[in-house]
Amino acid sequence: MRVEIAGESALILYFGEQATPAVSARVQQVAQALRERLGETLVDLVPSYASLLVIYDPLKTDHFAVRAAIHGLPAAGETVASGEGRLVTLPVYYAEEAGPDLAALAQRAELSIDEVVRLHQQTEYRVYAIGFAPGFAYLGEVDPRIAAPRLATPRQRVPRGAVAIADRQTAVYPAVSPGGWNLIGLCPQRMFDPDAQPSMPVAVGDRVRFEAIDRERFLALGGELGEVV
Amino acid sequence: MSALVVKQPGLLSLLQDSGRFGAHGVGLTCGGPLDPWAFRVANRLCGNSDGATALEVGFGGLVLESEGDGVIAVTGAELDLKINGQRASQWRSHRIAVGDRIELGYARTGTRAYLAIAGGFDVAPRFGSTATVVREGVGGLNGGPLKPGDRLPFTVPHSVELWQLPQALRPRYGDAATLRVVLGYQQAAFSREQQLRFFQGEYRVTDRSDRMGFRLEGPAIASSLDGILSEGICHGAIQVPADGQPIVLMNDRQTIGGYPKLGSVIALDTARLAQLAPGAIVRFEAISQEQAHNLNALAAARWQRLTLDPV
């Protein structure tokens, strides 16, 4: 683990150069341990693929004390249990009317649409990071056969619930927003609901599986075929 | 409950408290006032706690009408403040009564004014804070800027004294600032020459600056990295995209991102940056983290000692 200064009241911890499930589990483990150790001197934490940003209150502590807490953590492997996360299943209506890039992605991959849909469902993804927008969970990693680069020109409007692929990541758009990822379907489950408790169905470190549903089921679950611009 | 009714919302008027913390894990950013000192002074002039919900009035143009008696104060950007058509001073509290019309003209110097009311605006917090972040649709009355007809509720406190900030302590917002930077993040990927270029260069605030980030224009700098694995972005982080033009990330920044960063501007100075209009000049100066800690401690001690004059 490498510790760098991020700002006057923030340190960033790097756990590796690559995002792997083991690295991600370690990020979670350290986040949890620091939350306990730093108590009210901690302002917030931002876990990501292979790093953890630790923001502290500079009037209650300083970087020496925060570094000391970090160096005093148990080494990796001593407490592994917390890294697994929950398994969350998200329903997806895969179809060209719900995923305008599905056909192009299949063609690019030289696969049938059914095969793309099958490959997207067969992987158990890990929530590596949450950001970009509230509730936007970066899930990895998709089968290399269906990995696809971002669109050359991002769309102005991607509907809420859009299930998308960019490189080897996949995600569900939590709200209507601009976006450059390849859209392959729609998920009726709200990914961010400020009025719900918890506000998100997943957290960093959780595992996600996608499960195909048909149009009827999608609509019954409250899904909406939003406009794509 | 009394309320101030929005007659004219102004360009970007937002309900803010001191910010939203502890919710980065679901992707929610901080929000909060861009100039926390002016925000806190407005609250103190009204006898409020430092983090009471007040208005950040971006660029001015706000007109309110009161449905109750109360005490208000306006600080920050220099503008024409009028109560019932009469000029009124900023940096002091004023009594208002039912039917009073409060007008904030457009900012002449500085860009963000703050309007506090005794007792604070009574708004339900979301995720522990009332801070409005428009991009996320969270905070304030309904996640957005003030609209005509909005009612900003407040509870009239029993008795409030009127105060003013001593003249000598009132800030002057200019058109240039030197921003102090704590080096960090990917700073090692910026060569000595590139860092020299950055710290000796003059940058101009562009009109593509907002509550998310201030985009600057000046000598392009490059790092040896194309991009990085997305990671947490702290307040004031100086992000350098491929075009080499730095962006200083502010209160509404996204919580994670993948551009290389040279370090971060300290909060005392992002507050000064936030008051600069497009075209203003900024320079950067590197300081150590210990110096930053000292500056914070000093600022906190000054804040503790700050005494207001009775009106």
Image: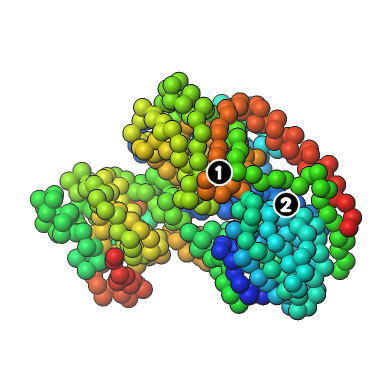
Query: In the rendered image, which residue does mark 1 sit on?
Result: B280
Left or right of B265: which side holds B304?
right
Looking at the rendered structure, the secondary structure element under dot 2 is: helix
The x, y position of residue B141, in whole percent, is 59, 69
Nearer to us in this view, B110 or A109: B110
Q: In this view, does A198 lie above or below B174?
A: below
The x, y position of residue B260, in whole percent, is 42, 35
The residue lying furthest to the top in this view is: B192
Nearer to us in this view, A86 or A225: A225
Q: In this view, does A147 lie above or below B292?
A: below
Left or right of B197: which side holds B43?
right
Mark 2 vs mark 1, foreground winner is 1
Identify the residue at horizontal 41%, vertical 31% (top origin): B221
Query: In the rendered image, which residue does mark 2 sit on?
Result: B40
The x, y position of residue A45, in whole percent, is 54, 43
Identify the residue at horizontal 13%, vertical 49% (top origin): A109
**Within-10-Å neighbours for mark 1: few <14, some 14–19, many 20+:** some
Give how far apart the Cα atoms at labels 2 and 1 are.
Answer: 25 Å
Q: Which amino acid does label 2 sit on?
A: Arg
Pointer 2 or 1: first along the chain: 2
The x, y position of residue B259, in whole percent, is 40, 38
Left or right of A195: which side holds A161?
left
**Within-10-Å neighbours for mark 2: few <14, some 14–19, many 20+:** many
